Image (cartoon, rainbow, N blue to C red):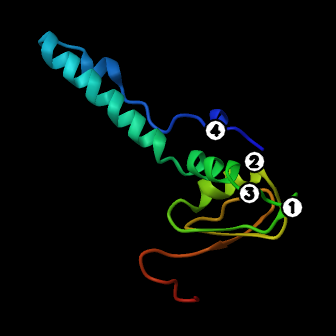
């Protein structure tokens, strides 16, 4: 199965812009800490990383059927496809995304699509 280490960090802020300039050292240190905390928090909730971590804890058969829907559906589907042999997966996303093993259906948010 794939490793969480394969999932790139979610967000990196422009440190030169946010920590540069004529900031007092005390302010610069606090901003640096705040940036580290924000990046760590965003990395911790990244859908692919969370999905791979959950899959690693499960004893799953060699091939699986997977469903991914909601705001994090694309990241979850990609992680499942990376970590498992997905057969017959269903992905519901806001845009037509291609993920190996998944059939994609485009949904709407926050209201259902007229053709739903």
Residue 92: x and y, percent?
A: 62, 71
Can the viewer see residue 21? yes
Residue 18: x and y, percent?
A: 26, 23
* Dot 4: element: helix
Tag 1 or tag 4, which sits nearer the N-term?
Answer: 4
Pointer 2 local density, CA inside 10 Å: few below 14, some 14–19, many at least 20: some
* Dot 1: element: strand
Tag 2 or tag 4, which sits nearer the N-term?
Answer: 4
Residue 98: x and y, percent?
A: 72, 58
Q: Which residue is mark 4?
A: 4
For the point 56% across and 49% down, the residue is 50
Pointer 3 local density, CA inside 10 Å: few below 14, some 14–19, many at least 20: some
Q: Nearer the viewer, mark 2 or mark 1?
A: 1
Is 27 placed above or below 50 here? above
33 or 77, which is in the foreground?
A: 33
For the point 28% across and 24% down, the residue is 33
Q: Which residue is mark 2?
A: 82
* Dot 3: element: loop
Report the quarter where the C terminus lies.
bottom right
Q: Nearer the viewer, mark 4 or mark 3?
A: 4
For the point 62% across and 56% down, the residue is 76
Report the quarter where the N terminus lies.
top right
Q: Nearer the viewer, mark 2 or mark 3?
A: 2
Q: Nearer the viewer, mark 4 or mark 2?
A: 4
Left/right placement of residue 16 relative to residue 6 reads: left
59 or 101, which is in the foreground?
A: 59
The numbered mark at residue 63 is 1
The numbered mark at residue 99 is 3
Q: Quadrant of residue 49?
A: top right
Q: CA distance from mark 2 to mark 1?
A: 12 Å
Q: Nearer the viewer, mark 1 or mark 3?
A: 1
């Amino acid at each position: 199965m794939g490793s969480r280490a394969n999932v790139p960090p979610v967000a990196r802020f422009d440190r030169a812009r946010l920590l540069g300039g004529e900031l007092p050292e005390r302010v610069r240190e606090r901003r640096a800490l705040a940036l580290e905390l924000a990046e760590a928090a965003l990395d911790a909730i990244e859908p692919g990383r969370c999905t791979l971590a959950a899959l690693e804890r499960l004893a799953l058969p060699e091939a699986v059927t997977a469903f991914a829907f909601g705001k994090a559906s694309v990241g979850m589907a990609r992680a499942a496809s990376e970590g498992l042999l997905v057969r017959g997966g269903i992905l519901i996303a806001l845009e037509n995304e291609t993920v190996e093993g998944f059939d994609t259906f485009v949904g709407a948010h926050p209201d259902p699509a007229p053709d739903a």
